[in-house]
Amino acid sequence: MSKIINYEIKSRCSCHHKIESILKEENALFIGEDHQVDTYFKVDTGRLKHRRGNVENSLIYYQRSDLAEARESHIQMEKLVTDNSLEVLLAKALGINVVVDKRRKIYFIDNIKFHIDYVKDLGVFVEIEAIDEKGALSLQELQEQCESYIKRFGLKRKDFLSLSYSDLVQESFKKRIYREAEDFIKLTRKSLSNLGVKLNMAKLDHLCFRVTGQQEYEEYKKSFAKIGKKLVESEIGGRLISTYRLETPINCDGELGPSIVELASPKKNNNYALGFEHAEIVIEESFESLYHEFPDINFDKKGADKSYNPDIRIKFEEGHSVKFHHQSLEEVISLEKTRA
């Protein structure tokens, strides 16, 4: 049985074609595309799974923290034949927790393993695993290897996952949306704080959730309709946006946040990872007063001269952004309905 220490990252991904091109440029060894069915069993600590695939067949036990960042992982793995008799035995002895179905493209560069994953019902992800099977590398060296490819691929930390695919498959849509919204608000608060701006939760008007394609947009419309009321669907900037008022406001560290979420279909030729992409804040002061108060912030002023509900934006390196308006989204929707 192999005992392995990994330093790894899992991220939602809208640029998998770019990543595969980079891997090919660097002469990565392509192992193949594997249809993998991972059966997770009920255990008290860690995770135990049986993987059935065309390329990889293994019994895997691993322990790692649930942090949305690159992290250390301790793995014990036994390679198996394709016979599923062990899976049947473990299912009877322990019980099945969840099954994850995915298609995985597998690449290697030296000791670094790369996965491009298409997970059923979840979307597209990339994994980077810096692997030490012989105890020859320090944790710092593994971390540096992993971080170098995070930078090389241009991955955004807002898209990093803390949970495993098994957790995501089990999680209800409502629970996932509220958890991801809270995580996004925390990230936004931290990013603003680094610029000296305090996020007033009472002024946080709504969040925008992006999808990767039109089919996904239609599927998420149905899902959001189950946890909130659709206020309007409008064509804005050449693509459809649906707006929902959630059944309950988003709670972040005990503070009530917004209950309004925009679901935006993708613009043509724009790639977004699935998930929350920007927050919008209603302010009373003028844009000019913000420029004066925060002269070191590089505000995006492209929307400042719009005749209808103008805005300014702060873009962050992590890939998310914040817009500032003078009207709430519900006020804007109400005015639009009056004009119609």
Image: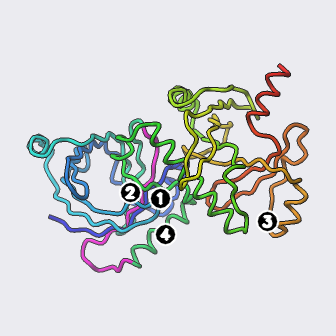
- Lower sequence index among marks 3 and 4: 4
Highlighted magenta segment, given as a residue range: 122-139
Q: Tell me which amino acid carries mark 4.
A: Glu
* Secondary structure beneath label 3: loop
Q: Which residue is mark 2?
A: 107
- Residue 61's spot in the image, x, y percent? 22, 58
Task: Sort mark 2 into few (<14), some (14-19) or many (20+) by Cα contacts within 10 Å.
Answer: many
- Residue 36's disc is none
- The first of marks 1 and 2 along the sequence is 1
What is the residue that sits farthest to the top in this orientation? 340
What colour scheme does the image use? rainbow
**Disc 1 to disc 2: CB gap under 8 Å:** yes
Q: Quadrant of residue 7?
A: bottom left
- Please identify, in this view, whether the residue under mark 4 or under mark 2 is nearer the observer: 4
Of residues 214 and 200, the one nearer the viewer is: 200
Q: Using residue 264 as the reference point, say whether residue 89 is left or right of it.
A: left
Name the amino acid type tagged 2. Tyr
Q: Position of residue 9 (x, y in %)?
A: 43, 61
| Badge number at residue 297 | 3
Q: Which residue is mark 4?
A: 147
Locate the C terminus by quadrant: top right
Q: Are marks 1 and 3 in contact (CB under 8 Å)?
A: no
Q: Earlier in the sequence, mark 1 or mark 3?
A: 1
